[in-house]
Structures are given as C-alpha cells and as structure tokens.
Image: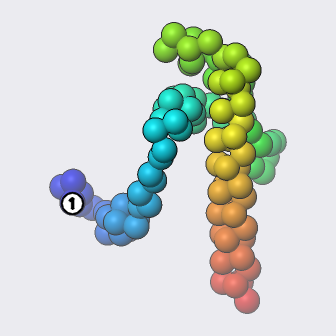
Amino acid sequence: MWGLSGPGADQLRARASRQTVIELWPSNLRPWDRFMSVATRWQYAGMTGTIVGLDYVAAELVLRTKGVTLDGETMADLQACESGALQAFRARDERRAAEERSRRG
C-alpha cells in the first residue's frame, strides 16, 4: 500500500485499513468542506495539549481566502462540526488514558 516501507510502515498500513467512510447528505457537503478547510486551526490548552476548540480568527482568515464570509449560518455550521470533533477527540483521549492506566497495572 502506497509503497510504504521502514519503521512504522506496518502500523500505518493497519491504521489506514481501519479508516471510517463518512457519508454526507448533500445539504452537509458545503459545511463539511468549510470545516475541513479550517480543521487545522485548533487551539490547545496549556501544557496538557488538550484541544479546546477552533481558533475562529484563523478560521475566518482561511475561509476569506476561499471567498467565504464567516456569517451566522457559516459559524453555526462550523460550531456544529467543531462540537462533533471535540466529542471524538475527548473520547479518543479517554480511551488512550484508560489504555495507559491498564498498561501500568
């Protein structure tokens, strides 16, 4: 797969094979596209590195470069996607913490 070799290649191939397919309703394609264009603009909490939400100033800049105005509807769409992503991040972090606790005994 992808010509991968070297340390970690097996783990990366295994992870890629478990990727989830997301199906979107047509009415959600535009909001999802806009969210994905700003999905690297997360704010992190202090030393813990916990993701706390999108950086809306940076998100607005990214959207503006795409010709999108961050109006009320667009903001509501972003916040709905952000909320779902934050729930997924928290669930992932809780799983990792539980795995770490079980390793320690």
Q: Quadrant of the N terminus?
A: bottom left
Q: Residue furthest left?
A: 3
**Residue 97 picture location, percent across and down:** 72, 70
Left of 6 or right of it: where is 82? right
Q: How is the image coloured?
A: rainbow
Name the kind of residue labelled 1 in the image: Met
Q: Quadrant of residue 8?
A: bottom left
**Residue 84 picture location, percent across and down:** 67, 49
**Residue 72 picture location, percent across and down:** 73, 20
| Point 36% across, 61% down: residue | 16
Say above or below: 42 vs 74.
Answer: below
Q: Residue furthest bottom?
A: 105
Q: Residue furthest right?
A: 46
Secondary structure under badge 1?
loop
Residue 68 appearing in the image: yes
Left of 53 or right of it: where is 27? left
User: How many numbered markers are drawn?
Assistant: 1
Out of 3 and 83, give the one closest to the viewer: 83
Q: Quadrant of the C terminus?
A: bottom right
| Point 45% across, 53% down: residue | 22
CA neighbours of label 1 inside 10 A, class few (<14), some (14 to 19), many (20+): few
| Point 53% across, 38% down: residue | 28
Say above or below: 2 vs 96.
Answer: above
Residue 7 appearing in the image: no
**Residue 47 picture location, percent across and down:** 79, 46
| Point 40% across, 67% down: residue | 18
The residue carrying mark 1 is: 1
Q: Quadrant of residue 89?
A: bottom right
